[in-house]
Image (cartoon, helix red, strand yellow):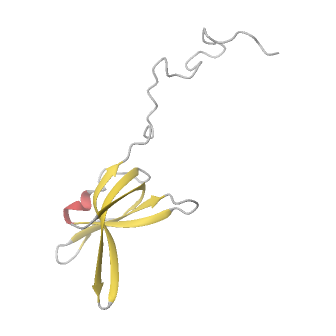
Amino acid sequence: MGKSFEIEGRLKVVNDVQTFNSGFTKREFVVEVEDGNYPQMIKFECVKEKTSLTDGMQIDDPVKVTFDIRGNEYKERFYVNLNAWKLESVGGGPTPNQTPDYGDEDAPPGLGDPPGMSSPDADDDIPF
């Protein structure tokens, strides 16, 4: 295998698996990578058994792609493909519909107090 590269971003597009007459299969997906004011949309492809790399991933998931750069010539034209062979989910805080698991010492002051009640540590002075 040639030199491998890694890049992190957010999964933006996952295309359907394409199957060709020869039995060859491939799937393309796009990852958005932050680059200053202009995010870059980078298209990768995965082939054969690697077409399942995106299974279980959701759009906007943070991911890390490991890939090779493949180039070839066909009829005096040159083509470059970013051949993904590993796709990992990158942790980044709670997933949607999941609340942080605060212990008592981690909870912000007053969290969970009934309305009109304050925690025992709260200052009882009223500023008016």
The image quarter in which residue 53 lies: bottom left
Q: Is residue 106 depicted above or below 100 in this figure? A: above
**Residue positioned 43% across, 27% down in the render:** 101
The image quarter in which residue 98 lies: top left
Q: Residue furthest bottom?
A: 76
Percent position (x, y) of residue 86?
27, 56
Number of residue marks: 0
Percent position (x, y) of residue 84?
29, 63
Q: Quadrant of the C terminus?
A: top right
> Foreground residue, 27 or 78?
78
Q: Quadrant of the N terminus?
A: bottom left
**Residue positioned 49% across, 22% down in the render:** 106
Q: Residue furthest right?
A: 128
**Residue positioned 60% across, 12% down in the render:** 119
Residue 4 vs residue 1: left or right?
Answer: right
> Foreground residue, 87 or 58?
87
**Residue positioned 19% across, 78% down in the render:** 21
Q: Is residue 118 depicted above or below 106 in this figure? A: above
Percent position (x, y) of residue 19?
23, 71
Residue 69 vs residue 102: left or right?
Answer: left
The image quarter in which residue 70 lies: bottom left
Q: Residue furthest front?
A: 3
